[in-house]
Amino acid sequence: MVRILVVDNGGQWTHREWRTLRDLGVDTKIFPNTAKFEEFENYGVDGLVLSGGAPRMGLQNNLGNCKEYLQKANFPILGICAGHQFMARFFGGNVKPSKIPEFGKVELQILSKDSLLFKDLPKKSIVWESHNDEVVELPPTFELLASSENCLIQAMQHKTKPLFGLQFHPEVKHTEFGEKIFSNFITICEE
Amino acid sequence: MFNAEKFVEESIYKLKNTIKGKALIAFSGGVDSTVTATLVNKAIRDKLIAVHVDTGYMRKNESQQVETLMKKLGLNYHIIDASKEYYDSLINIVDPEEKRKIIGEKFIRIFEKVAQKEEVDFLIQGTIAPDWIESGDGLRDTIKSHHNVGGLPKEMKLKIVEPLRDLYKDEVREVARTLKLSVAERQPFPGPGLAIRIIGAATKDRVEIVREACFIVETEIDAAVSKGKMTRPWQYFAVLIPIKTVGVHGDKRAYGYTIAIRAVESIDAMTCSYSNIPHEVLDRISIQITNSLGEKINRIVYDITHKPPGTVEWE
């Protein structure tokens, strides 16, 4: 069974990420973002989810030990909300307070045709948001996957490595194809 | 996938090993506390004592219904009417967090008294995942202090046991169905009760108003559901907004409070969308409330906020 760990950055929906993975038959466990990278290796890890959280990535630089995880990991990582923003900043992108923050229902438009993370998703779907900051500049090694009316960088993917960032929240029930996105990420981790 | 049968089996085993001697359960009569009581009852039998506190902020006839339920479940129980005490301590309290903390502490002090008399060390609570998630911790912001987590006093003697801590409401309902409990589909009702459905001070007069308004919202929606006019929302109730607006009653000026109708769709309370109640049903609710509450209420509004940005309850 594939083992995907959830890094808790203090999000309201961290436990929902755990639950979604568990419901999809994954061996999963929540670790606080103060955990050392060795703890993941000791437990066994095929993939990592970096949760969202209250820390303002548009105003501060650190997010627990997430930097260490991004430096050392050689397995797929999915950053969500603050996790996504931190990933963008780590690889040389930029994060700022949103001009128009999004909370709740938003229409997502997928721009990429061949991203494995969005495999079998319709071009337009409803996603649920909750963010004060956003990625305003993609890291040079990343490509844009999806946008919404008020937030250009809703999803991104590393050009050569299995690293993904989502501004919206695939783990909540109100996101139409959230579970499908997780099962696509599971497939990526299995490979 | 969550396996309710396995969960029941494992919980009873764990509870047997954890609870030494007698235990109290904080029993509101909702799905969470009823499932918890049933599990603990299977584990320790008649060493379990259920305590239901009538805070004065319960819905219409609710405490009587809870008593019937406790009898039906074969629980040893106490019902404690603490309404006067609650009204007195909340009389000037406006801040929602302060309300929640006073209510939470009062619950514990009442349980401690019963525990001392009954020589009990354990307090069982029907806490579920959103309660501790929203209450906050070292890592997480406090959205609202749930009375059973963030509302607990710092110093307390009882040892807390929470068998449903990792479950969401939909999973608790699955367990309830497995246990064949009549409350499996009951809509959620917050521990602080109607006190947090009154914006501002939760005085006795205002409770009477919001209790009646909640009763009307529930009755009308239940009727509409049984006539097939709509599907049952996940949760539906009234909120009293103590802001006065002008109306006209029988050629005379009226100046009364406002009621908001709130109904949401959810699975787990972590995200919600507002319900589309048909206009015909809203119309009936509006007229029923303004007619039965007369000079007290002359304006009805409909809350169309998702979660986020809102939460289900207003406080």
Image: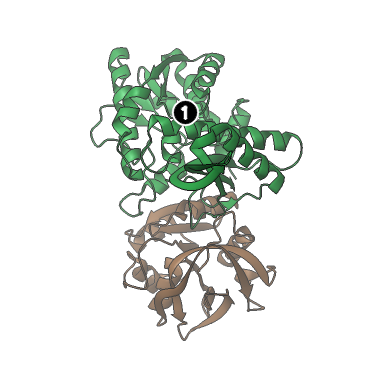
> Quick check: A136 left or right of B263?
left
> Quick check: A184 left or right of B208?
right
Q: Tell me, by letter, which chain the rendering colours green.
A: B
Badge 1 marks a residue whose secondary structure is loop
Which quarter of the figure is the N terminus of chain B placed in? top right
Q: Residue at x 50, y 69 (%)?
A: A167
Which quarter of the figure is the C terminus of chain B placed in? top left
Q: Please identify the residue farthest to the left as the structure is shown.
A: B155
Q: Which image quarter: residue B194?
A: top left
Q: Given the image, what chain letter belongs to the residue carrying mark 1? A: B
Q: Position of residue B26 (x, y in %)?
A: 41, 26
Whether residue B107 is visible here, answered yes or no, is no
Q: Position of residue A145 (x, y in %)?
A: 58, 77
Q: Residue at x 56, y 53 (%)?
A: A20
> Quick check: B283 left or right of A132?
right
Pointer 1 local density, CA inside 10 Å: few below 14, some 14–19, many at least 20? many
Q: Tell me, by letter, which chain the rendering colours brown.
A: A
Q: Nearer the viewer, residue B217 or B54?
A: B217
Q: Position of residue A118 (x, y in %)?
A: 63, 70
Disc 1: which residue? B58
Q: Nearer the viewer, residue B293 or A171?
A: B293
Please say if A45 is above or below B38: below
